[in-house]
Image (tube, helix red, strand yellow):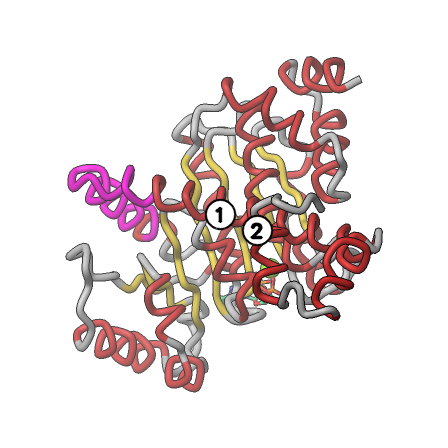
């Protein structure tokens, strides 16, 4: 069953890929096996994240960048993650419509992901979908996430480069921008630069950048774009190229990937432990095994929890 699906994916069957992605979204018990099977064949494709406030123009930007990546001979997988809207919600539907002209294109695969399954697992599910796209031969993955909240930033953290997309009216957003999203940005984009206040916005961002210290030495540049009018796309690509080159020349590209892998294994481990603990509650194992001893003061809650963790007492 899995064999047949994997074979079809290798042969470029998008329906088989969509079915396998559904397994990721449904948190299928087959998932670990699927990942183990495909992992030796992955090429560690380049992943670029686009994050920023709702409606900033992230999808429009991605949409306009697709032809540029294609011209370079890439096949592109797009993962649009929307942690707030339901799967068929307005924003996602909008994304679908805006990107529809690429949908029939064999070199572009677009997938929206919503809150099916547990929200906490969304970052991991996006990483896994990226692996499937890699296996299917897409050599650039673009993530789009709304840049607020933990999930958005977790997903962005699994990218090799992150563009934070803002709009001229986003002054408040800059003011309230938490250190978190500042740290996230490798490139700033001021989109909708056809509107008043674009220059002011660029200056606010640059002012903020100037006041900051950057560990890696890369000072995030700001690119002005009009994504609905195809303005600024070449400049964006140039900054992206410069950033990736900078990362590679300074050993930062690999370093970031190593850190991301550590984070990923940690996330999976936490998830496994959480499931184990939940099942220990569900099956009454905690009650059966340790509760009586604690009540009789032969054990205490800390000792009991540690023993359970170390499998001295099996869960
Ligand atoms: N004036 C102007 N409008 C733009 C520009 N880029 C995008 N838009 C419009 O802004 C609206 C939102 O664009 P999207 O690309 O859907 O924005 P998004 O950030 O993906 O939105 P969410 O995914 O819902 O968070 C759409 O109506 C676009 O046509 C631009 O440069 N100038
Ligand atoms: Mg969008």
Q: Residue at x 43, y 30 (%)?
A: 44
The residue lying toward the viewer, choosing from 235 and 270, is 270
Q: Height in image: 22 above or below 96?
A: above
The residue lying toward the viewer, choosing from 200 and 130, is 130
Q: Height in image: 181 above or below 286?
A: below
Crowd class of label 2 (few under 14; some 14 to 19; many from 20; radius 10 Å): few
Callout 2–callout 1 Cβ contact below 8 Å:
yes
- Snapshot quadrant of residue 87: bottom right
Q: Which residue is mark 1?
A: 266
Q: Is mark 1 within 8 Å of ligand 1?
A: no
* Residue 240 forms part of the magenta stretch: yes
Q: What's the magenta region?
A: 236-256
Task: Pinpoint residue 258: horizontal percent, then vertical percent.
Answer: 34, 40
Q: Visible in this render: residue 95? A: yes
Q: Quadrant of ligand 1?
A: bottom right
Q: How many marks?
A: 2
Task: Pinpoint residue 243: horizontal percent, then vertical percent.
Answer: 25, 47
In the picture provided, is 213 more to the left or to the right than 22?
Answer: left
Crowd class of label 1 (few under 14; some 14 to 19; many from 20; radius 10 Å): few
Task: Pinpoint residue 176: horizontal percent, then vertical percent.
Answer: 42, 84
Task: Pinpoint residue 48: horizontal percent, then vertical percent.
Answer: 43, 46
Q: Residue at x 40, y 82 (%)?
A: 196
Q: Residue at x 70, y 21 (%)?
A: 13
Q: Secondary structure at mark 1?
A: helix
Mark 2–mark 1 distance (CA, rounded to whole Å): 6 Å
Q: Residue at x 66, y 47 (%)?
A: 313
The residue lying toward the viewer, choosing from 107 and 17, is 17
On residue 168, which mark appears?
none
* Residue 246 forms part of the magenta stretch: yes
Q: Which residue is mark 2?
A: 270
């Amino acid at each position: 069953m899995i064999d047949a699906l994997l074979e079809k994916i290798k042969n470029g069957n998008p329906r088989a890929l969509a079915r396998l992605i559904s397994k990721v979204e449904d948190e299928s018990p087959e998932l670990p096996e699927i990942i183990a099977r495909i992992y030796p064949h992955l090429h560690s494709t380049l992943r670029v994240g686009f994050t920023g406030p709702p409606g900033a123009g992230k999808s429009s930007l991605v949409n306009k960048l697709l032809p540029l990546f294609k011209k370079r001979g890439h096949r592109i997988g797009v993962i649009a993650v929307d942690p707030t809207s339901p799967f068929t919600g307005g924003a996602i539907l909008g994304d679908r419509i805006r990107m529809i002209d690429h949908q029939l294109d064999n070199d572009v695969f677009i997938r929206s992901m919503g809150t099916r399954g547990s929200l906490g697992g969304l970052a991991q599910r996006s990483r896994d979908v990226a692996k499937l796209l890699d296996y299917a031969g897409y050599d650039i993955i673009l993530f789009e996430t709304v840049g607020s909240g933990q999930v958005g930033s977790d997903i962005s953290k699994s990218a090799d480069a992150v563009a934070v997309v803002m709009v001229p009216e986003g002054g408040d957003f800059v003011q309230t921008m938490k250190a978190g999203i500042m740290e996230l940005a490798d490139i700033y984009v001021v989109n909708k630069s056809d509107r008043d206040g674009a220059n002011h916005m660029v200056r606010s961002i640059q002012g903020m950048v100037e006041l900051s210290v950057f560990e890696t030495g890369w000072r995030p540049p700001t690119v002005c774009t009009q994504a609905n009018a195809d303005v600024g796309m070449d400049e964006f690509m140039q900054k992206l190229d410069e950033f990736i080159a900078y990362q590679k020349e300074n050993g930062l590209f690999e370093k970031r990937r190593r850190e991301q892998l550590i984070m990923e294994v940690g996330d999976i481990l936490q998830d496994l432990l959480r499931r184990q603990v939940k099942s220990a509650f569900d099956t009454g194992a905690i009650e059966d095994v340790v509760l009586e001893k604690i009540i009789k003061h032969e054990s205490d809650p800390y000792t009991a929890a540690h023993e359970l963790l170390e499998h001295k007492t099996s869960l």
